[in-house]
Amino acid sequence: MSSREEASGSAIEAPKMASPQELPKPQIPNSKYTKRVVLKTLLERSDGGLGLVGERIVIGGWVKSSKEIRKEPPPQPEPEHRAQSGHKDLTCNEILQTRVPILRAFMKIFGMGSRSGKKKEKEVESGIEQRVQHPIESTVILQVSDGSCVPTLQVVVESSLVPPGRIMLSGTCVLVEGEIQRPSDPGKHAIELKTEKVLHLGVVEDHEKYPLSKKRLPLQTLRNWAHFRPRTTTVASITRIRHALTHATHNFFQNNGFLYVQVPVITTVDAEGFSNKFHVTTLLNKMMKESSSGDDTGGVNLESIKVSIRQKSDRVEELKRTGSNKEALIAAVQDLNKTKELASHLEEKEKQKEKSKDLALVKPAKFNFLDDYFSCQTFLTVSGRLHLESYACALGNVYSFGPRFRAETSQSVRQVSEMWMVEAEMAFAELEEAMDCATDLLKHLCKWVLEHSTEDMKFVLKRVDQSIAVRLQSLVSSEFEKIPYCRAIDVLKQVREKKFDLQTEWGIPLTEEHESYLANEIYKKPVIIYDYPKEVKPFYVRQNDDGKTVAAFDIIVPKVGAVIRGSQNEERIRPLMTRIMELGLPSKQYEWYLDLRRYGTMKHAGFSLGFDLMVLLATGITDIRDVIPFPRSFGKAHN
C-alpha cells in the first residue's frame, strides 16, 4: 500500500471529533414518579451544578427565605405636543394646580387661569397619571428546599409571573419551571434557576400563625409542631441520618446471613418479667357504650322531674281531700306513677354515668378478660426477643426492627414511651458471640453514617456538635473495654470526686448516671459490662454457675449511655421455670416459650439495640424526643 493510500485509509478510520458546541449536554434525571428534579442531584454534584447551566428543569420545594429587588421605573418621554411647543419645565402655578386639588378648586371659583392654562393643566395631569399608573417591576430571589439535601437552590422569579407578596413568605410551596444559569451576584450559590413558569403555588394563609415564620426556633419549641419541624434544616438532617442508619442496619444483618422477621406488637406475655406495660383492651369502650345506650329520656333533667313529682303529689292529695272528682284522681295517680318511673330510670342512668367516670381507676384484675377482644389479657410489647427465639430455633440467625412500648413515667432525655428497637437472635451462640456481633453492628453503623451522610454530617458538625465526627471515628477504631458487673461496682465505689444519687453497692441496677460516669470519665471509650445480678435482668437470661449472676451484657457509649443490651438466654427448662415462679409470672402464658426447651433446644443468644439512641449517638443531639419523628412520652402524645 502506498503512503497516499495509507494516509487515505487512516483518514477513513479516524473518528471525527465533535466540537465543544456539538457535545450533548448532560441530562438531569427526574424523580421517577413526580416528573421534577430532586435538588440533591443538582446541588451535591462535585461542580455544584455548573455543568448543568443552560438545562431546563422543573423543581418543587418550600421557600426558606426570600428577598425582593425592585427595579427603577423607566423614564417617561414628555408628550409630543409639549415637546413641539418648546415647554420643558412646569410653572409654579401649574404644579400647585395639579398637586393641590383644593387650591385648584379655589382658582376655578375665582376665575383664575385661562383656557390655555386649563389646557396646560390637563397636559400635566395626563403626564402624572401615566407615571402613577406604571407598575413597579421587581425580581424576587427565593431560597428553596425540597428536603433532599442541606443546601437550598436559589430561584429567581420576576414579578410579572406572580405577585411578590404571594410567593415570598417562608413556608410557601412552589413548583416552577425554568433554566439553570450562573447567578448574577456570585456568592455561596454556584447556580440559580431563572423561572419561566410557575406551575403551582401553595400559599401561607396566615403568616403570623405559621410557627416557622420565626427563624432559628430551638428544638424544644419545635416539639409542639411535630408536623412542621421536618421543614427545618436541623430536623431534616436528623431524619436523613436516621434513614441512612435504617438502611445500614438492614445492610449489616443481610450481609451477615440473618433473616428479617416481623414480631407482633400485641402480645400476651411480659417479655422481661418486671416491665411497666400498656394494656390493650376494648372493655372500656364496651362499658362506656353500655352506660350511654338506651337513653330514652329525651334530654329531661332529673331535678326537674323531682320537682314535677312533688307538684303532682300535691295535686293527688288535694283531689283525695275533696273527693269530688274520682276520674280526675285516677288520672292524676296514673300520671304520678309514670313520672316516678321516669325518675327511677334517670337515677339509674346517673349511677351508670358515675361508674363510667371511674373506669380509669378500675384495676385490670377486676376486668373479665374473657369478654375482651382477644378473650385474654394483652399488652403492647416491650421486647420482641421471646418471639424471635422461636424463629431462631428453626431458621438460625434472625433479626427484627420495630416499635417497642414501655409505660414509664420517667422524664429522662434517653427514654420515651415508644422506641424503635433492633433485635437479633442467634442459634448455637453464647454470650461472647452475641457481644462480638453487637460490637460489629455498632461500628458498622458509625462507619456507614460517616461515609454515606457526608453533607448532613457536615451540617451537624457546624450546628450541633463539633466533636461528633471524631467520636464516631474513635468508636469505629477503638477496642471496647470489657468488665464484669462486680468490677464496675468496685470502680464506682472508689470514686471520691462525685456523689451518685443511688448509693453504689453490689446488687443495684446501674443507673444512667453510673453508666455515663464509667464511659465518659473513667474509661473514656465504649464499655461492655457483663455478668449482672439475676435480679436486675429479665427472667429468660441464662444463670451462671455461681447462682447469683446471669449471662447478660450492656454496651455503654460515651455521651449517650447504654445503646445495646443483650444476653445468652436460658436453654435449660428447670432453671427457667424456677425464675418464672420466683417472679410470680402466669406460667400458662409462657407454655409456648417453655416448649422451645422441651422440643429440640440449643444454646442461643441475642441483643437489642435502641435505634433512637443510635441516632442520638450519630447526630450529637442530647434529647431523644428531637430525633423521633412523632415522639410519645409521659403526658404527651401530640399529632
Image: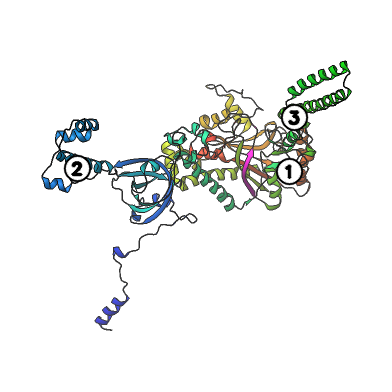
Write down the quadrant of residue 551 in the picture: top right
Q: Which is more N-terminal, label 2 or label 1?
A: 2
Tell which circle, 3 or 2, labels the residue nearer the N-terminal end: 2
Whether the residues at callouts 1 and 2 have beta carbons within 8 Å, the answer is: no
* Residue on which the image places disc 1: 571
Q: What whole-number distance in Å separates the C-alpha atoms at marks 3 and 2?
A: 91 Å
**Mark 3 or mark 1: whose residue is earlier in sequence:** 3
- For label 2, the residue is 123
Q: Is residue 60 above or below residue 218?
A: below
Going by the numbered disc 3, the residue's amino acid type is Lys
Gap between marks 1 and 2, in whole Å? 104 Å
Q: Which residue is mark 3?
A: 363
Question: Is residue 151 something one can see in this rendering?
Answer: no
**Between 548 and 312, the one nearer to me in the picture:** 312
- Compared with residue 446, is residue 510 higher up or lower down, i.e. above or below? above
Label 1 is placed on what type of residue?
Answer: Glu
The span picked out in magenta is 397-414
Left or right: 615 in relation to 135 = right
Q: Secondary structure at mark 1?
A: loop
